[in-house]
Image (cartoon, grey):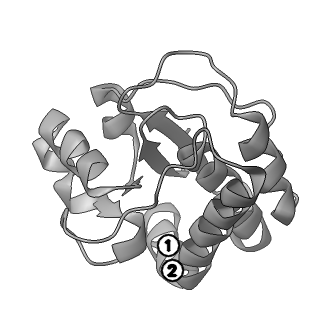
Amino acid sequence: MSGTFTIMFVCTGNTCRSAMAQGAIRVLLDKKRSGKYEVISSGTSAATGFPATAYAIEAAKIWNANISGHKSQPLTRELIDRADLIFALTPSHFRDIVSMRKDAVSRTFLLKEFPNSGPDGEGVDDPIGQSLDRYNETFLEIGECLGKHLDEIVKRLDEKVS
């Protein structure tokens, strides 16, 4: 998409954390920069075409985010190249991204450590197989991180699309 800023979230299976993050950032950015961004997500061990888990879909509703149409996809070099800003959900995801595309290091960040770069820091725990309450906690954790860093995300978006 020409003239848009592409944000990618990367987790393991691309059916929980990254899908929820995708929904959360859309809610936040639609209020500030509607139509100026694209959000994608992928997983380091994802299969193609699986929906977000039922609990991820339910948890995203906390912010009225609709991720019911989500389809998983594996992390690829092409997706990395497409993204202007990449959020890894854990240090191992960060390392996987950079091992595929060394030049992506300057635009890859741990979600919880943004805008500091590097693979060192705290990740977002995977709620897969756990209760809806745990998914809700994970969604709120992701949303809090995105909200805290929204001004910096918007600044980077504006630098590219203006």
Residue 11 lies left or right of residue 130; in this view the side is left
At label 2, the amino acid type is His
Q: Label 2 near label 1: C-beta < 8 Å? A: yes
At label 1, the amino acid type is Ile
Q: Nearer the viewer, mark 1 or mark 2?
A: 2
Q: Seen from this angle, which residue lies furthest top?
A: 48
Does the image show residue 114?
no
Front residue of 82/114: it is 114
Residue 115 picture location, percent across and down: 34, 77
- Could you tell me which secondary element the residue under label 2 belongs to? loop
Please, is residue 146 above or below residue 126 in the view?
below
Residue depicted at 61% across the width and 77% down the height:
144
Splitting the image into 4 quarters, where does residue 21 fall?
A: bottom right
Q: Count the labels in the image.
A: 2
Front residue of 77/123: it is 123
As measured in the structure, the alpha-carbon distance from the residue carrying label 1 to the one carrying label 2 is: 6 Å
- Could you tell me which secondary element the residue under label 1 belongs to? helix
Residue depicted at 17% across the width and 38% down the height:
101
> Label 1 belongs to which residue?
153
Residue depicted at 22% across the width and 40% down the height:
96
Within-10-Å neighbours for mark 1: few <14, some 14–19, many 20+: some
> Can you say which quadrant of the picture contains the N terminus?
top right
Front residue of 64/162: it is 64
Residue depicted at 65% across the width and 25% down the height:
71
Please, is residue 105 above or below residue 121 in the view?
above
Residue 137 picture location, percent across and down: 67, 66
Residue 63 picture location, percent across and down: 83, 64
Splitting the image into 4 quarters, where does residue 30 fall?
A: bottom right
The numbered dot on residue 149 is: 2
